[in-house]
Amino acid sequence: MLNKINFKSLDSGTQFKIFDRMTNHIKELTAKQIENNAMECFANILLEETNIALAENAGQCEECGMDAESMEWQEFDKVFICPDCGHCQ
């Protein structure tokens, strides 16, 4: 999933926002999580925070007003899609 996101195309503010949030999540990992599945946890945090940061950049859906965090980034088309009404912006 992470290979679908072109991190080089993200502005530095968005990249820093993702990095800052990731470091906060990583500090909260338990010793067991680090020992057993550190890379899986790291990848999941990166994916989750990237999706949230990108959705925040899109803002609310222009059609139905769905909150920004719900918007889904489509790297291929370079658009955000509202999961509620299907609007692209």
Image (spheres, helix red, strand yellow):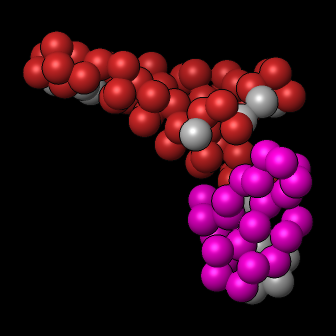
Q: Quadrant of residue 8?
A: top right
Question: Split into 4 quadrants, where in the image is the N terminus?
Answer: top right
Residue depicted at x 35% and y 27%:
40
Q: In which quarter of the image is residue 33?
A: top left
Residue 71 among those drawn in magenta: yes
Residue depicted at x 79% and y 60%:
80
Residue 15 visible in the displayed image: yes
Left or right position of 42 against 54: left
Give how far across and how far down residue 26 sits, in percent: 35, 22
Question: Split into 4 quadrants, where in the image is the C terminus?
Answer: bottom right
Give how far across and how far down residue 15 sits, in percent: 70, 25
Q: Give the residue furthest to the left.
A: 32
Q: Give the range drawn in magenta.
A: 66-89
Residue 24 visible in the displayed image: no
Give how far across and how far down residue 70 sits, in percent: 60, 65
Left or right position of 54 against 46: right
Numbered circles on residues, count: 0
Residue depicted at x 11% and y 21%:
32
Q: In this view, does 23 lie above or below 41?
A: above
> Considering depth in this image, is 40 or 11 the residue closer to the camera?
40
Q: Main secondary structure of the magenta part?
A: loop
Q: Is residue 5 above or below residue 85?
A: above
> Considering depth in this image, is 79 or 66 the residue closer to the camera?
79
Left or right position of 1 against 64: left
Q: Is residue 21 above or below residue 1?
A: above
Left or right position of 35 against 40: left
Q: In this view, does 42 lie above or below 80?
A: above
Residue depicted at x 76% and y 53%:
74
Give how far across and how far down residue 6 sits, in percent: 77, 30
